[in-house]
Image (cartoon, rainbow, N blue to C red):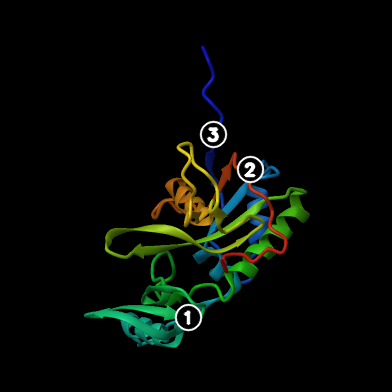
């Protein structure tokens, strides 16, 4: 029997705890995934990053949760892009254009809301460095969040932070198999990794971390994270 060709593998990281402010995210991942290897890409949901960094809003007793959420959206918004009923698509202070400023009310205690990480690229760099120290491995890190898509139903995970891998793979100037020169193609590889990882993390499974294995991606120097 012939073996299948080499490809990309997406691996869940089970056994992680419920995270709280101040918890050691890198230590928990290293304990749950001691099998991490050089070249792996660790994809972590932004909610976990925000929780350990304490980027939460506590809802005061007697305050309606939706009222608190709208106030939090106001605080995180620099520009309203679109509005339909109570739904607002806004630009956040981070620069993201996203529904409800990326504020999440799921998978969190009833008296709290989760904000986006203050600087997800910096969070990714810190996690990458910590995993190298704990396990001696050189990995990439992607911090993912769930975004809607313009003119399409459904949501998908995209990258809001990254370290140790290019955000874009630039094919401009390359020639395809038919001799056509590519003029505009830049592949958002970090978004593709975020979406692939969510296939094993899921929205309800309580698996906030996954590992993508089998890609050979260069380490950019300097590393601009998701800025491109």
User: Where is the C terminus found, in terms of image quarters?
Assistant: bottom right
Q: Is residue 181 above or below residue 81?
A: above
Question: Which disc number belongs to residue 24?
Answer: none
- List the residue tagged with mark 3: 7
- Image depth: mark 1 or mark 3 in front: 3
The spot of residue 1 in percent (x, y) is 51, 11
**Sequence-wise, which precedes: disc 1 or disc 3?**
3
The spot of residue 109 in percent (x, y) is 43, 70
Query: So how many labels did they put on this image?
Result: 3
- List the residue tagged with mark 2: 216
Q: Is residue 34 above or below residue 106?
A: above
Relative placement, left or right, of 165 versus 3 is: right
Q: Is residue 91 above or below residue 147?
A: below
- Image depth: mark 1 or mark 2 in front: 2
**Sequence-wise, which precedes: disc 1 or disc 2?**
1
Residue at (56, 45) in percent of width and height? 212
Query: Which class describes the residues within 10 Å of circle 3: few (<14), some (14-19), or many (20+)?
Result: few
Q: What distance separates the C-alpha of mark 2 from that of mark 3?
A: 11 Å
Outermost residue to the left? 85
Q: Are marks 1 and 2 in contact (CB under 8 Å)?
A: no
Can you tell which quarter of the image residue 74 is in? bottom left
- List the residue tagged with mark 1: 57
Residue at (75, 49) in percent of width and height? 135
């Amino acid at each position: 029997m012939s073996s299948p060709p080499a490809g990309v593998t997406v691996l869940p990281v089970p056994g992680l705890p419920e995270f709280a402010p101040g918890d050691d995210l890198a230590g928990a991942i290293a304990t749950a995934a001691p099998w991490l290897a050089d070249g792996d890409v660790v994809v972590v949901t932004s909610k976990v990053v925000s929780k350990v960094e304490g980027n939460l809003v506590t809802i005061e007793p007697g305050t309606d949760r939706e009222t608190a959420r709208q106030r939090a959206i106001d605080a995180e918004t620099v520009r309203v892009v679109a509005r339909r009923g109570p739904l607002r698509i806004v630009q956040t202070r981070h620069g993201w254009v996203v529904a409800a400023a990326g504020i999440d009310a799921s998978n969190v205690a009833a008296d709290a809301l989760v904000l986006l990480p203050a600087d997800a690229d910096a969070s990714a760099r810190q996690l990458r460095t910590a995993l190298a120290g704990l396990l001696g491995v050189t990995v990439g890190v992607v911090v993912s969040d769930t975004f809607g898509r313009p003119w399409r139903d459904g949501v998908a995970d995209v990258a809001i932070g990254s370290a140790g891998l290019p955000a874009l793979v630039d094919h401009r100037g390359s020639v395809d198999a038919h001799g056509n020169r590519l003029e505009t193609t830049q592949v958002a590889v970090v978004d593709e990794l975020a979406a692939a990882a969510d296939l094993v993390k899921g929205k309800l499974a309580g698996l906030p971390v996954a590992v993508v294995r089998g890609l050979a991606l260069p380490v950019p120097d300097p590393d601009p994270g998701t800025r491109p």
